[in-house]
Structure formats: structure tokens, C-alpha cells
Amino acid sequence: MNFPSRLIEEAVTEISRLPGIGKKTALRLTLHLLKQHESVATSLSQAILDLRLKTSYCRVCHNISDSEVCATCSNPKRDRSIICVVEDIPDVLAIENTSQYNGLYHILGGVISPMQGRGPEDIKISSLMERVDHPLDQDLVKEIILALPATMEGDTTSFYIGRKLEAKGIKVTTIARGIPVGGELEFTDEVTLGRSIISRTNYSMQ
């Protein structure tokens, strides 16, 4: 692709680094921004910079938060006896949109994947165990819901966490397989995801 300006080429290159955006879409966005008032570009760049430099994460569940403890973890109306374990932040948003769950969350930040060199120590499993042993406000954790992807890596992670929780006497469940094998929670429709949460089953170690 030939560009009329080095500045446009650099902008297209950077924008096309975003997931799902190819060179043509990046060019359209670049030309759109070029036509806007300077304040639009300034506001956009400042918002992106603030996002990268000022975003913080909840020390409890690892979700994005404006404070040390996120609004979900600090909400007294949430059921603190249940923790739903998910792979990443979009999964929390997907489950919240179903309006079928009122417990807490724990974001692992990934799943165990030997092929990618990611082991149990590379995701936030140890902090989950810490929450089980030392729960918020001394409320006992009675159930852990494993809402991980229906993939080999997700199943491996569920099995590993299930084994670690087995000796603690905590009920371990997994969302019903209304989620297709190989599917991601982020892209599952709200009705299917909601029913999967409601119809969760005991997690089998077999």
C-alpha cells in the first residue's frame, strides 16, 4: 500500500496494530481523524495515554478498577460466598450482562498453556487460594464456579484449580456446557451464557 505521507503511513501502521483492524480500516480511520478538529485528536490521544498510565486493578479480583478495591468486591449486596473464576476481564462483562449472577469474581489473566509457556505460576491462581483461605470480611467462601473456556487449556486450568480446592472442602462447580466446545465467553450470547450460569454443575475431578 502506497501512502502520500510518511505521517499517514506511521499512523496507519500504529492503528493497524489493534486487533481486528487491517491496513484499509486503519487508513480510513487515519483520514477521518485528519479531517477532524485538532481537539478531537488531542482528546483521543490523551484518553489512550491516561488509559495506559492511570488504569489500576482491583487488589482482590484483578478487575479494572478506579480504586484499590473494585465496585463489585466492595458491594455489600453481592454474595461473598461465591466466587466465579474467569480467564479475563471481557468474561466478567459478559456474565454481568446476563443479570443472572450476584457473586464475586476472580480474574486469572489467562489459562494454563504449556504450548505457550504459561504455567500455573504465570496466572493468578495463588491469589485465588489466598482469597479462599482469607476471605473478604471473614465471610466464608462456599462455592467456586469455574467459568473458563471450553478448550483443552481451559479444562486443564479447571482441573488444576479443582485439585487444589479439593482438600479445602469447598463446592466446586463449572458452568453448564451450553457454551460450545472451543467457544469463548466473550462472544457467547447472553441467553446461553445466563442459562449456563444458572444450570452450573458440580465439577468432576474424573
Image (cartoon, helix red, strand yellow):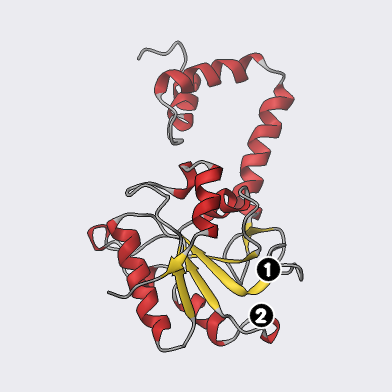
Amino acid type for the residue under numbered disc 1: Cys
- Secondary structure of the residue carrying numbered label 1: loop
Which residue lies at the image location 72% right of the left edge and 62% below the top edge? 71
Percent x, y for residue 179?
41, 49
> Decide: marks 2, 1 in contact (CB < 8 A)?
yes
Res. 32 image quadrant = top right
Percent x, y for residue 196?
49, 54
Which residue lies at the image location 43% right of the left edge and 58% below the top edge? 176
Res. 158 image quadrant = bottom left
Q: Nearer the viewer, residue 42 or 153?
A: 153
Asked whether the viewer can see residue 67, the reply is yes
Q: Quadrant of the C terminus?
A: bottom left
Which residue lies at the image location 69% right of the left edge and 31% below the top edge? 42
Count of marks overlaid on the render: 2
Percent x, y for residue 7?
50, 22
Which residue lies at the image location 51% right of the left edge and 73% below the top edge? 144
Q: Sequence-wise, which precedes: disc 2 or disc 1?
A: 1
| Residue annotated with mark 1 | 73
- Secondary structure of the residue carrying numbered label 2: helix
Give above or below for 170 relative to 48: below
Of all residues, the one furthest to the left in this rendering is 115
Query: Which numbered tag is attached to residue 136?
Result: 2
Res. 149 image quadrant = bottom left
Amino acid type for the residue under numbered disc 2: Leu
